[in-house]
Amino acid sequence: GQIIVATFVGIMFVIGYSIIDLNYGIALGIMAGFLNIIPYLGSFMAMVPAVIVALVDSPWMLIQVLIVFSIEQFIEGRVISPQVLGSNLSVHPVTIMIVLLTAGKLFGIVGFVLGIPGYAVFKVIFMHLFEWYKSESGLYQEDEQETFIETEDV
């Protein structure tokens, strides 16, 4: 799913940079797509070279690059990511940031790329094991006591 989102992001950046006629726009758009495999941080890391190229060109080009970036972030966050990724894992954004920071610190760039998928796999396995344990242990069974309603004679 993340690769599909990254592909769409790369295409959007290539189109956007081509429309504003940014120097090296196609290369920067393709690089943005590859970097977007890293959730949250990838798009921002891809913006650094685009901003530098825009600054060398002109202040107006910088404004245009920031507009393209804003439009891309809006479309990705509101349309593409929810449609492609959905909310199947129900992972809170703070959890994603903690996983990224921890995996990045421990494993470097490989941790950034594989941290979230690794977390997702671990979460699915843990949830299945916990569901199995609940069904086998009997500790989580609801009490099947009948509730009696007292009635008073009037």
Image (spheres, rainbow, N blue to C red):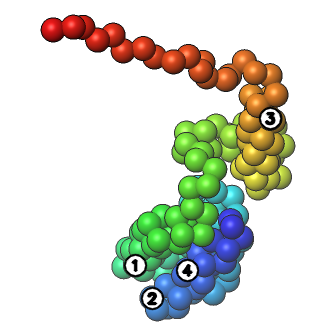
- Residue linked to disc 1: 64
Q: Verify CB contact (< 8 Å) between mark 2 and mark 1.
A: yes
The first of marks 2 and 1 along the sequence is 2
The first of marks 2 and 4 along the sequence is 4
Q: Amino acid at mark 3?
A: Trp
Q: Mark 1 against mark 4, which lies toward the viewer?
A: 4
Q: Mark 3 against mark 2, which lies toward the viewer?
A: 3
Q: Amino acid at mark 2?
A: Ile
- Marks 3 and 1 sit apart, C-alpha to C-alpha, by 54 Å
Please, which residue is most extreme toward the left here?
Answer: 154
- Marks 3 and 2 sit apart, C-alpha to C-alpha, by 55 Å
Give the label on residue 117, or none.
none
Crowding at mark 1 (Cα within 10 Å: few <14, some 14-19, many 20+): many
Q: Where in the figure is residue 7, as x and y percent of width and height?
A: 66, 77
Q: Secondary structure at mark 1?
A: helix
The first of marks 1 and 4 along the sequence is 4
Give the label on residue 20, or none.
2
- Residue linked to disc 4: 13
